[in-house]
Image (spheres, grey):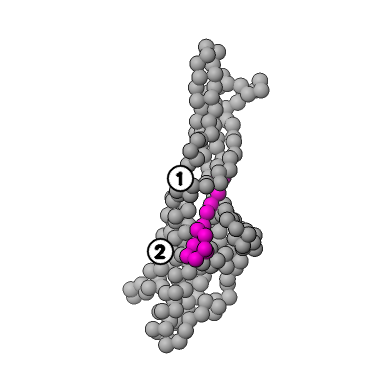
Amino acid sequence: MADPTDVDLVYYDLRDSVNLLDSARAVPREVRRVFSRYVELSQRLTSAMRKDFKARQGSSWEASRFSGWTPSTELLKYLRNEDQHGEQIFITVHDHHVYVFPHEIGINGHRTRELSAKSEWQMTNQMLDRPPEGLEFSVTWDDGTHEVILPTRTESTYVLYPRNDEQRKRIAQAGNADVYSLVAETFVTLTRYHEFYLREICA
């Protein structure tokens, strides 16, 4: 088996960043950091192709040879330029908290075991892992004692947070502001792009 080319190495790094993003879901700071890395690698892939193609064929490689680009991949290109020359990528965290209560607790006269609550965190400090104050319930028992009920499960989704009108327009044009959905969709396209390139250099 031939050694991987620089193009392959960038693609493998891109694939690894997708896996890292999946494992970082509970840590907002890591989600933003790994997503930013994914965006950068998505554009570095073409840079590696240009260098490799020039060495092999003596001519220029153009990403426009590939016809599978989508509004979402155009958004990645824009975000990469913003990261380098404009404003950094920000995200908003949407949490779905699930609380499990003791059997003897009732809400509005109804016994309940599970309660769901949703919250949106604009994450003004993009370096935080969680909001400074979490969402919790305090239960007062008949004897006057208190018990704090913390979430037993929190499911987080991450949404691109536009910091100016141009970012807002570009995100709207892509029709996909969810970070994980955007990565899943664009990685399929970038995989096809990588496969297309390999066919082109073998033609």
Q: Looking at the picture, how far across and down is residue 14, in whole percent? A: 44, 63
Mark number, residue 13:
2
Residue at the extreme top of the image, as rendered: 143
Q: Looking at the picture, how far across and down is residue 185, in whole percent? A: 56, 61
- Amino acid, disc 2: Asp
Q: Earlier in the sequence, mark 1 or mark 2?
A: 2
The residue beneath circle 1 is: 128
- Amino acid, disc 1: Leu
The Cα–Cα distance between marks 1 and 2, rounded to whole angstroms, is 26 Å
Q: Is residue 84 magenta?
A: yes
Q: Residues within 10 Å of mark 2 (few under 14, many from 20)?
A: some
Q: Is residue 125 magenta?
A: no
Task: Tell me, yes or no, whether the two marked residues, 1 and 2, touch with CB atoms within 8 Å.
Answer: no
Q: Residues within 10 Å of mark 1 (few under 14, many from 20)?
A: few
At x 55%, y 44%, the residue is 121
Mark 2 lies on a secondary structure that is: helix
Q: Looking at the picture, how far across and down is residue 19, in whole percent? A: 44, 56
Q: Is residue 44 above or below residue 183?
A: below
Instruction: Please tell me whether mark 1 or mark 2 is closer to you in this view.
Output: 1
Q: Is residue 51 above or below residue 16?
A: below
At x 45%, y 48%, the residue is 127
Which segment did they paint magenta? Answer: 82-94
